[in-house]
Image (tube, rainbow, N blue to C red):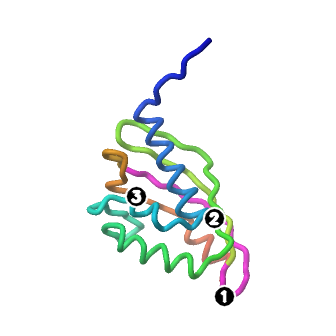
Amino acid sequence: MSTAQPQTTTEQNKQLILRWFDEVWNQGRRETIYDLFAPDAVLHDGATNFHGPDEFCRFYDALRAQLSDFRVTPIVSLAEGDLVCLHWSVAARQTSSGKPLQITGTSVVRIHDGRFVEAWQNWDQASQAAQLG
């Protein structure tokens, strides 16, 4: 008989980022943004920064309006200390044209007390532009 081992902080952080992408992006659960994105958190998306859940929601709503049939698939996750990284792929459809889209990206998140406090993301915008032309 074996007993379950408690999860390490790094494993908990990996589970949080997987929860984020599944609930926020795949399930469309905006309330998870407020659960996991701390009030003073910042997302660095290239040259643009989004501060707090309200600003993130504006980014989220704009992206969801442009793309439908959104599906994020985790590829690999890594964690060390308070940082967790997820390399992911997205399959979606441009709402206005119906064109399919497939891109990849990477997100790195700093987690404190079970919430995202800072995040950096890079995604293949050149491929997106080429596919949606």
Q: Residue at x 44, y 44 (%)?
A: 84
Element on which disc 2 rests: strand
Above/below status of 82 relative to 122: above
Q: Distance between the Cα atoms at labels 2 and 3?
A: 27 Å
User: Majority secondary structure of the magenta segment?
Assistant: strand
Q: In this view, does 54 lie to the left or right of 86?
A: left
Residue 60 locus on image (x, y percent): 48, 73
Comparing 26 with 104, the one in front is: 26
- The quadrant of the image that shows the N terminus is top right
Q: Three-letter amino acid code at disc 1?
A: Ser
From mark 2 to mark 1, how far is it between C-alphas? 18 Å
- Upstream in the sequence, badge 2 or badge 1? 1
Estimate how packed mark 1 is, as few (under 14), some (14 to 19) or many (20 or more) residues with alpha carbons within 10 Å: few
What residue is at 58 percent from the left and 56 percent from the top?
A: 22
| In the foreground, 1 or 102 | 1
In this image, 19 relative to 10: left or right?
Answer: right
Image-quadrant location for residue 59: bottom left
The magenta region covers: 94-109
Which residue was labeled with disc 1? 96
Question: Is 41 one of the magenta-colored residues?
Answer: no
Does residue 31 appear to the left or right of 110 in the view shown? Answer: right
Q: Residue 103 carries which label?
A: 2
Q: Name the residue under label 3.
A: 35
Q: In this view, does 93 lie above or below 108?
A: below
Q: Position of residue 82 (x, y in %)?
A: 35, 41
Q: Nearer the viewer, mark 2 or mark 1?
A: 1
